[in-house]
Amino acid sequence: TQWVYNFGGGTAEGNTTMKNLLGGKGANLAEMASLGLPVPPGFTMTTEVCTTYYDNGEVYPDGLDDDVAKGIAHIETLTGKAFGDPKNPLLVSVRSGARASMPGMMDTVLNLGLNDDTAEGLAKLSGDRRFALDSYRRFITMYSDVVMGVHHHTFEDILDEYKDNQGLMLDTDITPDGWAEIIGLYKDAVRDALGRDFPQDPREQLQGAIDAVFGSWMNDRAVVYRRLNDIPAAWGTAVNVQAMVFGNMGDTSATGVAFTRDPSTGENTYYGEFLINAQGEDVVAGIRTPQTLTKVARENMGDNEPSMEEAMPEVYGQLAATFAKLESHYRDMQDIEFTVEQGKLWMLQTRTGKRTARAALKIAVDMAEAGQITKSEALMRIEPLSLDQLLHPTLDADAPRDLIAMGLPASPGAAIGEVVFDSDKAELRAKAGHKVILVRTETSPEDIHGMHAAEAIVTARGGMTSHAAVVARGMGRPCVSGAGSIRIDEAAGQMSITGRIVKEGDIVTVDGATGQVFAGEVDMVQPELSGDFSKVMAWADELRTMSIRTNAETPLDVQTARDFGAEGIGLCRTEHMFFEADRLGYFREMILAQDKAGREAALAKILPVQRADFAAIFRIMADETKSLPCTIRLLDPPLHEFLPHSEDDIRKVAETIGVPASEMMARSRELAESNPMLGHRGCRLGISYPEIYEMQARAIFEAQIEVENETGVMPIAEVMIPLVSSAKELEILKKAIEGVAEDIASKGVAPEYIIGTMIELPRAALRAGDIAHHAEFFSFGTNDLTQTTFGLSRDDAGRFLPDYVAQGIVEKDPFVTLDQDGVGDLIQIAVERGKATRPDIKLGICGEHGGDPASIVFCHNAGLNYVSCSPYRVPIARLSAAQAAI
Ligand code: ADP
Ligand code: MG
Ligand code: MG
């Protein structure tokens, strides 16, 4: 096994494709060296050294010492210096570098190889004692801190005290003799802290630093970071040992960082900072204010200090040429570290630069239009979920803020408003023109109107797929769920958050993208959907093969989704239409009716209302030439959900609909179920009370004809029966619906419709072959299918799912990302069996997973015709579907 890979002098043993073995930093140092760029020579110890070390009980592989010695010899040859030689000392940096950049790992040690002798040697050789001793004191500080565990404050305190005593302001005011004295104090401090001397032997120093990098792979910070970011421990880290170049050799030397394009706007201009007479870590440490790279940037900032372009025009020219070379080589925006040593440029790092969603769009579009990358590549470079950032207002990054509570980032966007604890009140205040934030312990279907009226929703309990989260995402409302520190005292009209009191009416700002709640008003910036956005969407539409629909029922949501490019409705939940005050009354009357005649009388009152709802949706989904398909699901939830529950409510409702309260209470008890989600719901209601589904079908068909009369285009209805588990259920209900259609057709115009079913029970997936005899389409209801496949209640899973994720039993929350192994298998079985019966059966998904990029890729591969998601997810789904097809 080759444990060590050399680079430098215009060649390298590694290259950029070897990131797994050499880490990101090592692979790209090798690549830059091979490109002929000025890279200080060095070598990379592979990630396999790290993994072997841990596999063998923290013992290095045989022969590693020799390989390291050869690596040092390679650097010595190329630099003409010798490690530990006081007359001409070689100094190196020791840099960690995993596959993915990983904060929490050991920091880099610079200037390794210095000791009392080599420091004096460096002084003579450079003719600059200040520089040599400055490097030595930096080395003692860094090495002691990161390798030996003596906190760097120890050294900073000594330095500050020295400067105070001498009446000096700046580090650069310290004389060489002053540094020598400080170095003595530093060494004393190390001895005091550890009871041993600072190591003087460069080889011992090197081994110590290498041990520290490999050791840091398993330190707590790194372990936590890996867990949070799904990085396997088995990747290991590489170690890079590289000849030092010095940015601290006076005013012709400097160090800096740069992006080849602006990482926040994507603008095609160089972006970066540099410091004269400094070493790498000074730029980030913020000890001195860095200067700009370009003249334009300096002018824009009104900065007085010259830019690099002005201060060092020649080196700047080389740097700019290097940027161009790197960008055209890597074909992407690069994030770069460089150092200038006495007028000579050295490259120390390059990697693909992190960027905002906005910049990602702009860079992808610019590079594709310039012919640097293909459209497919451009699309692959945009993280679909990041588009969310562009669709919602966001907090101004620079605005001051006062954080009061943290929860889950359940639905993105930011909003400001007054706190309200009750949905009715939220609606009232909103009607009176106030902006409100609905804060609840948790929400239920009875809060829909309050959620609609609110600018944002905050809950104390519940996860990413709680009622609040799902509904808020659907509505495009920002939502923070599960903010556990919030205690609501509705009676007192206030909440307390770890001792802080927020009263009803107090202003708060909610950031659904981060899960944060702030006291008062935080400044916001409105989204601007740029031309780049529509270009990317248009390219995605060219490439994708699945169509994208939306889950929506209110005209506002339907319109929003259409504006975002939805090509139909995949799920219109009719029960949501019943929660508005006046309708709920009729509906309750229907539920409470003692017999079929009573139910039909109540249903007759609901019919025109539903018809109007459907007509409104059809109008939005139709234009002069065509109509987009609308899948309408017939009544799904258990009736019990529509009944009033508190005694007070029951009395009120009983009064309005004119039945005795006792009767209502009795009926409510009768309807109660111990497991309503597995109970009398979905098509089971249709079987017991066919008149409900018949009324809904009539409302749909009559609405179609109404809209056709207006527009001349017949809307396309797809009538969907929920919770089917056997072919027989569907057969019976289908016949009833066809009966309604025939009745309507006999009076003149025939509606255009198909009938299909949801596949949301394991039995339905298994019996899909039979069911397809009666279904013209299947829509996978993956929320319920996940729930019933796992036997896991979506509303309660939040209590223990985190344990399951932590212990690796499930990889991700299966309600967020489809469980491809189990639920996915059922989907595949249903697709196969459904198609065997009916080859042209239409297939779609309407669960929350329809808006999740990874699940969308699965749907594409499973051969679905469309995915349906909440309105604000439509652009994400368009891009994800394109990525799946590329
Ligand atoms: P990080 O991953 O934290 O950026 P790096 O290994 O990239 O750590 O190094 C930290 C700083 O030290 C960077 O500014 C880098 O450019 C600088 N540096 C690293 N190696 C050398 C070297 N051989 N000569 C000069 N500066 C170096
Ligand atoms: Mg770096
Ligand atoms: Mg369902």
Image (cartoon, grey):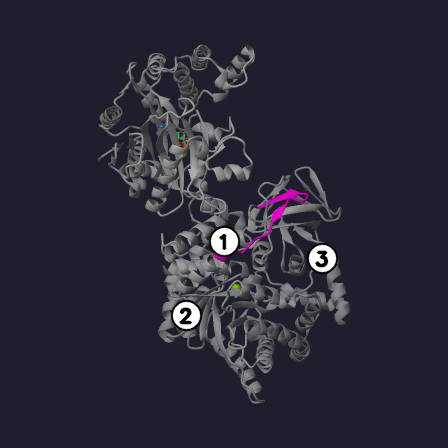
Is residue 215 part of the magenta span, yes or no?
Answer: no
Q: Nearer the viewer, mark 1 or mark 3?
A: 1
Marks 1/3: CA–CA distance: 29 Å
Amino acid type of the residue that numbered disc 3 sits on in the rendered structure: Ala
Q: For ligand 1, which image quadrant applies?
A: top left
Residue at which label 3 appears: 430
Quadrant, the C terminus: bottom left
Vertical arrangement, residue 465 with respect to residue 115, above or below = below
Marks 2/1: CA–CA distance: 39 Å
- Residue 856 at what x, y percent from top left? 43, 59
Residue at which label 1 appears: 387
Q: Earlier in the sequence, mark 1 or mark 3?
A: 1
Q: Quick check: 564 left or right of 883? A: right
SS at mark 2?
loop
- Residue 449 at what x, y percent from top left? 67, 60
Q: Residue at 39% x, 75% y: name it.
A: 840
Q: Nearer the viewer, mark 3 or mark 2?
A: 3
Is residue 522 part of the magenta span, yes or no?
Answer: yes
Amino acid type of the residue that numbered disc 2 sits on in the rendered structure: Arg
The magenta stretch spans which residues? 515-532
Residue at which label 2 appears: 767
